[in-house]
Image (tube, rainbow, N blue to C red):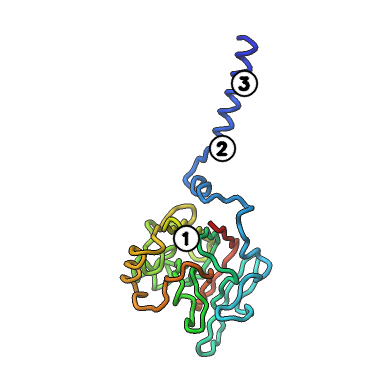
Amino acid sequence: MTRYALILLILFSLSCKQKEKEEPKTEVEMTEMAQDTSQEQWQILFDGTSFDGWHLYGGGEIGEQWKLEEGAMVFYPPKERSEGASYNIVTDDEYTNFVLSLEWKVSEGGNSGVFWGVYEDEKFGRPYQTGPEIQVLDDEGHPDAKNGTTHQAGALYDMVAPSKNVVNPAGEWNKVVLTVNHNVNQGSVVMNGETIVEFPVHGEAWDKMVANSKFADWEGFGIYKTGKIGLQDHGDVVAYRNIKIKRL
């Protein structure tokens, strides 16, 4: 073998090894690569040390019902609740087109939810009155899971059911990546590395989904393209961590 041929062989071998290293080997890796997780594009919404960037829906600082524990924000429902009191929290900032990544863990028999497009106004007493919800639920222990698959964990609540059940049991963490992109009229939910929900985010197809849901006659539901991210007080213990968002 000539010296020139040997050099070509070495370069070819190195190129093959580099290509092999860069290629994803699992569906999870391929999904994560598709989400483009370059850190410089992400805005940290919760770093595990404070509630900076969040407030109670309707105004006010976050109180003792939400605690910081081991890098997570944990909601503990009060044993006694005054009439009308609610402890839903929302971001200070608003978002239109984005990728939201977070992890959640719910207590046994627990229920909560992640909202987007929340319009904060006095005439809307709760974030779910305007913001569509990605369901957070103990499918095995909470009765709402028996009310149809559109009420189960990961669903676009009461509108689009998960294509498969990939939720971890109560007490274990689940990773959710929610994408909402009005530019291409596409939304999706990736849970624990698998795409389980896809949906339009505006227009005739969206309006039809709303019309066929419990929200059909709700003034303001799902009409705000720009809004806040919200986490739900549904009266059960729930934890969230590693919350970040990327504008598209």
Is 23 on the left or on the right of 214, as rendered?
right
Q: Position of residue 177 (x, y in %)?
A: 50, 58
- Disc 3 and disc 2 in contact, CB within 8 angstroms: no
Dot 1 alpha-carbon crowd within 10 angstroms: few under 14, some 14 to 19, many 20 or more: many
* Residue appearing at x 57%, y 60% in the figure: 245
Tell me which amino acid carries mark 1: Val
**Marking on residue 10:** 3
Q: Which residue is mark 1?
A: 180
The answer to whether 83 is drawn above or below residue 187 in the figure is below
Of callouts 1 and 2, which one flags the residue occurring earlier in the amino acid sequence? 2
Going 40% across and 66% down the picture, which residue do you hit?
A: 152
Q: Is residue 137 visible?
A: no
Amino acid bearing label 3: Ile
Looking at this view, is 130 or 63 the one in front? Answer: 130
Instruction: Examine the rendering and report whether any part of residue 156 can be seen.
Output: yes
The disc at residue 135 is: none
- Secondary structure, mark 2, is helix
